Image: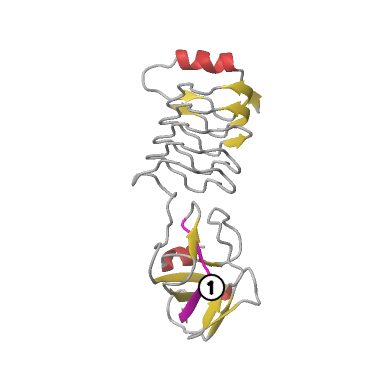
Amino acid sequence: MRQVLKEELMEALQERKGDALVDMQDVRLENMDLSGMKLQRVDFSGVTFQNVRLEKADFSGCKLKNAWFEDSPLRGAILQDADMSSCMLRKADMRECDIRGANLFSAVLEKAKLDGIISDERTRHFRLHCPEKGAFLAYKKCCYDRIVELLVPADAKRSSATMNTCRCSKAKVLVIKSVDCSEYYEEAWSIVNENFVYRTGEWVEEPAFDEDRWNDSTRGIHIWMSREEAIAY
């Protein structure tokens, strides 16, 4: 990965032609202060930010897909309409960041500081994907392609991170079918834990449910909001 100095980045920004994206893909930026800088409409896809100060930097309209932020505080940064899909933001300081219109699909936000973050209805994959309140139906794929339809009750804990997969603490098994709905089954086994069994008409529960929503692959009953998504898993 090629390392880019601050001077080269500034030169590339100055030579920008019209509204074209500045190409800074798959490079490494380290040990520099870019706080407050206007960095709009730059393609930072695959970039590693190592020990870079980014407080109040303006990333509006940037591509940050697969970018990695390590020891690079973003407090107060403007990320409006930025593509942040699959960004590595574990433990990142994102307090007061403006993510209105941003796409955070599959971004890693474990242990990130998110106090005061600003989002809106256009911000994608930041709010819960499942209903925040009330009961709802969910689906799960088990061993041998058995699809389990579940009723998640109103008092169940539920969460989602930045993808369409969700988790809940308990659910009732309504029906278990084959993918083509031609066969019905009385039980199905979890793909991850073969000792976790779903039986028609019975309740299943994960008492050690992890309530940190940004921990994606963790304790809980992993579910999908549609049968089609469960089948495609």
Can residue 98 be seen at all in this image of the molecule? yes
Can residue 147 be seen at all in this image of the molecule? no
Q: Residue at coordinates 47% horizontally, 44% vertically from top-left?
A: 104
Q: Nearer the viewer, residue 63 or 90?
A: 90
Determine whether, in the image, residue 219 is placed left or right of residue 230: right
- Quadrant into which the N terminus falls: top right
| Residue 132, picture quadrant | bottom left
Determine whether 57 is above or below 128 in the image: above
Determine whether 143 is above or below 60 in the image: below
Determine whether, in the image, residue 88 is placed left or right of residue 61: right
Seen as rendered, the residue at the extreme front is: 116
**Amino acid identity at mark 1:** Asp
Residue 81 coordinates in the image, percent (x, y): 39, 36
Q: Residue at coordinates 56% horizontally, 38% vertically from top-left?
A: 93
Q: What's the coloring here?
A: secondary structure
Determine whether, in the image, residue 81 is placed left or right of residue 5: left
Label 1: element kind:
helix
Q: Which of 186 and 153 is in front in this view?
A: 153
Residue 165 coordinates in the image, percent (x, y): 49, 60
Magenta-drawn stretch, dominant element (helix, strand or loop): strand
Q: Name the residue under label 1.
A: 145
Q: Residue at coordinates 47% horizontally, 17% vertically from top-left?
A: 13
Determine whether 205 is above or below 158 in the image: below
Q: Residue at coordinates 47% horizontally, 32% vertically from top-left?
A: 76
Q: Is residue 27 magenta?
A: no
Q: Does the magenta stretch include residue 169?
A: yes
Residue 90 coordinates in the image, percent (x, y): 60, 44
Determine whether 49 is above or below 184 in the image: above
Q: Give the range drawn in magenta.
A: 164-174
Label 1, residues with CA under 10 Å away: few <14, some 14-19, many ≥20: some
Residue 69 coordinates in the image, percent (x, y): 59, 35
